[in-house]
Amino acid sequence: MTKQKSMSVYIDEETSLMLNRLREEIRQRYEREGIPGNAPTIGWLARSLLREKLGMAPAKNDAPGAL
């Protein structure tokens, strides 16, 4: 088994607030539409948005439909 490369990053306060706001919007949409489950984590949102901005495909283990 090959170990995946990973990286830790620090998110500034402004970015963190926006990610929290986006997560809450998603949570409310799920609730309105009766979709069971939790909203995506802040980490998942950050990774997903970064991959999108860089023009990368979603990671193979990403949860579908969160955005």
Image (cartoon, grey):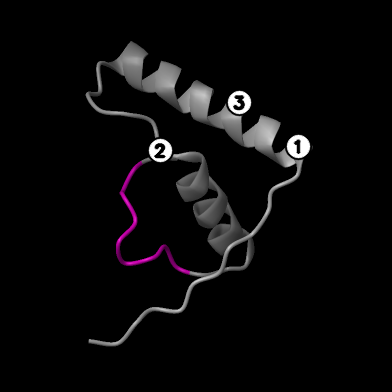
Q: Which mark is residue 13?
A: 1
Which span is picked out in magenta? 57-65
Quarter-wise, where is residue 9 in the image? bottom right
- Tell which of 23 and 67 is nearer to you: 23
Q: Quadrant of the N terminus?
A: bottom left
The residue wearing badge 3 is: 21
In the rendered picture of this protein, how many numbered marks are placed on residues?
Answer: 3
The local secondary structure at tag 2 comes to loop
Gap in angstroms between the C-alphas marked 2 and 3:
12 Å
Q: Nearer the viewer, residue 56 or 13?
A: 13
The kind of residue on which mark 3 rests is Arg
Name the amino acid, label 1. Glu
Disc 1 crowd rating (10 Å Cα; few below 14, some 14-19, many 20+) is: few
Q: Rounded to the nearest whole Å, what is the CA distance between mark 1 and mark 3?
A: 12 Å
Q: Is residue 63 magenta?
A: yes
Residue plotted at (54% across, 63% down): 51
Which residue occupies 61% across, 36% down?
19
Report the magenta stretch's main SS: loop
Rate crowding at label 3 as few (under 14), some (14 to 19) or many (20 or more) other CA atoms within 10 Å.
few
Q: Position of residue 35 (x, y in %)?
A: 25, 23
Q: Secondary structure at mark 3?
A: helix
Q: 8 above or below 10?
A: below
Q: Amino acid at mark 2?
A: Pro
Mark toward the start of the polypeptide (1 vs 3): 1
* Residue that appears at 32% across and 29% down: 38
| Disc assigned to residue 40 | 2
- Give the structural element (helix, strand or loop) at label 1: helix
Q: Nearer the viewer, residue 18 or 6?
A: 6
Q: Is residue 5 above or below residue 12?
A: below
